[in-house]
Amino acid sequence: MNGIINELENASALTYAEFTELFSSLASPETVGFSRLYADFVAPDVTEKLYIISAMLIVNAKKFNLTSIVEPREVIRKHIIDSLIPLGLLVERGITPRRMIDVGTGAGFPLLPMAAALSRISPSSAAIGLDATGKKIAHITECAEKCGLASVSGIQGRAEEISHDILREKSDLSVARAVAALPVLVELCAPLTSVGGHFVALKSHADDEIAASENAARLCGLRLSEKIDYVLPGGDTRTLVIYDKIAPTPTLYPRRYAEITKKPL
Ligand code: SAH
């Protein structure tokens, strides 16, 4: 991995040493969700992958529209740590995914940091990144390759279509960050989640949306398990919403996207 790291140090103007210093200035074993997994997150095989994910984002964001967050400290805070905290909170609750899917993964968040950590804590786990945009899928495939993350696959497609097909009820964890309002996400993600699995939404705040999603959750076979409020290191409120998949989703769902957004369940 050394060759790739050297190459990315030149291309991104962020060195591996600067990355590890910034990461440890922002996160510690006391960080929410980090107590159990901190030693794994800072193990070289994981840290190197997290560096590659960050540097690749900085490099590719100059070439095409991937993210507005490109300043190194903010990349680490709002992309890397913001993706690792939910994994830590899930593992603390006994939820370690074997087959996860990130719906609307964009530049690969939370997919790629989660997969980097899972490659150490649960090496047989697989992770799919789903996005409607081909360029974003090309980016995550390139990142996964450079990280040596064979567990990651990228699929270009729309959640409302692909969940009627090969990916229906195939993942024991579906996650989504910054994709749509919660009632919409429930209808998109529940059908991808296997019974006994979980749908987890990464939100900045969620009380109103949780109330508005009660009907959608019931109709799609989900039961609200827990809402966890916390603060990201350096500020910014966050809420993790965890649903249990308790019954198969009727094949009626998800509906067409225009219907989902116009008439939420
Ligand atoms: N999760 C990432 C990206 C958020 S931007 C992050 O938090 O940084 C939202 C992404 O969701 C976009 O890349 C968009 O292409 C994708 N998206 C929106 N609706 C979708 C759908 N129905 N199916 C698949 N991808 C979708």
Image (cartoon, rainbow, N blue to C red):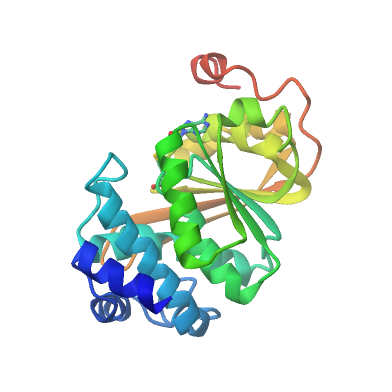
Question: Where does the image place residue 50, in percent across and percent down from the top left?
Answer: 41, 69
Question: Where does the image place residue 157, in percent across and percent down from the top left?
Answer: 56, 31
In terms of depth relative to the viewer, which is nearer, 136 or 205? 136
User: Relative to 106, is 156 on the left or the right?
Assistant: right
Q: Is residue 248 above or below residue 146?
A: above
Q: Residue at x 70, y 34 (%)?
A: 191
Give the residue furthest to the front: 3
Question: Where does the image place residue 127, in percent across and percent down from the top left?
Answer: 61, 55
Q: Is residue 205 above or below residue 159?
A: below
The answer to whether residue 161 is seen in the rendering is yes
In terms of depth relative to the viewer, which is nearer, 153 or 233? 153
In terms of depth relative to the viewer, which is nearer, 265 or 40? 40
Q: Residue at x 47, y 84 (%)?
A: 43
Q: Residue at x 41, y 62 (%)?
A: 230
User: Relative to 191, is 227 on the left or the right?
Assistant: left
Determine which quarter of the picture holds residue 76. bottom left
Q: Residue at x 66, y 71 (%)?
A: 123
| Quadrant where the C terminus is found in the figure | top right
User: Relative to 89, is 85 on the left or the right?
Assistant: left
Question: Where does the image place residue 224, in percent across and percent down from the top left?
Answer: 65, 46
